[in-house]
Amino acid sequence: MKQDKVYKIPFKGLKLGKHQFNYVIEKEFFESYPYDEFINTDLTVIVDFNKKDTMLVLHFKMQGTVRINCDVSGEEFDQFIESSYELIVNFGSEFNDDNDQILVVPHGEYELDISQYIYEMIILSVPTKRIHPGVIDGTLKSKALDKLEELQNRKQKEQIDPRWEKLKGLIKD
């Protein structure tokens, strides 16, 4: 799916000063990107857009939930995420996005596509280790957790051969 004009801000027609743009990000937003680890999303992004004479200042605020799979149990759960990001847009002779906080666009540009910045902010907000809250507090019941517990108990029950214990005693003496 190609991103439509929803995420393009036509700044040439805006008056100087502060403006605000609100976006609701759902699963369809990610269809044009290679990232497919979200089962569902319910995110709100607010962009405070400040147009000045020589630059644009954008402040992104995002919060909401993403439905993902737990790395331990494989169970789905809603992970709350929030983030903020500031982007300064300057005008120059050619496009340059080498700096992650300063974007240089050519003087002739009249609109700014912010979809890539929203995408990156969301992806970077999701924890790298995704653990279901039920796993942390011990309330989640699943087949995967039961199997892990069974394997852990089996490992603890295995006794060390007494002959090896005697050999370990030689090292200490």
Image (cartoon, rainbow, N blue to C red):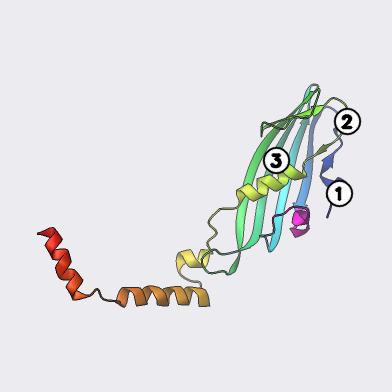
Q: Are the residues at dot 1 and dot 3 in contact (C-beta closer than 8 Å)?
A: no
57 is higher (above) or lower (below) than 155:
above
Across and down, in percent, residue 108 comes to: 88, 27
Q: Describe the element under mark 3 as helix, strand or loop.
A: strand
Magenta stretch: residue 164 in it?
no
7 is higher (above) or lower (below) than 57:
below
Q: Residue tagged by mark 2?
A: 12
Q: Earlier in the sequence, mark 1 or mark 3?
A: 1
- The quadrant the C terminus occupies is bottom left
Indicate left or right for 130 with 45 as reference.
left
Q: Depth check: 123 or 139 in front?
A: 123
Across and down, in percent, residue 61 comes to: 68, 43
Residue 118: name its quadrant. top right
Q: Nearer the viewer, mark 1 or mark 2?
A: 1
Magenta stretch: residue 33 in it?
yes
Q: Which residues are magenta?
A: 25-35
Across and down, in percent, residue 97 comes to: 72, 32
130 is higher (above) or lower (below) than 159:
above
Indicate left or right for 173 with 14 as reference.
left
Neighbor class of circle 3 (other Cα within 10 Å; few <14, some 14-19, many 20+) is many
Residue 38: name its quadrant. bottom right
Q: Which mark is residue 62?
A: none
Residue lying at 79% horizontally and 23% vertically, measured from the top left: 92
Q: Which mark is residue 4?
A: 1
Q: Depth check: 35 or 111 in front?
A: 35
User: Which amino acid type is marked by label 2?
Assistant: Lys
Q: How many marks?
A: 3
Q: Residue tagged by mark 3?
A: 60
Q: Are the residues at dot 1 and dot 2 in contact (C-beta closer than 8 Å)?
A: no
Indicate left or right for 143 with 34 as reference.
left
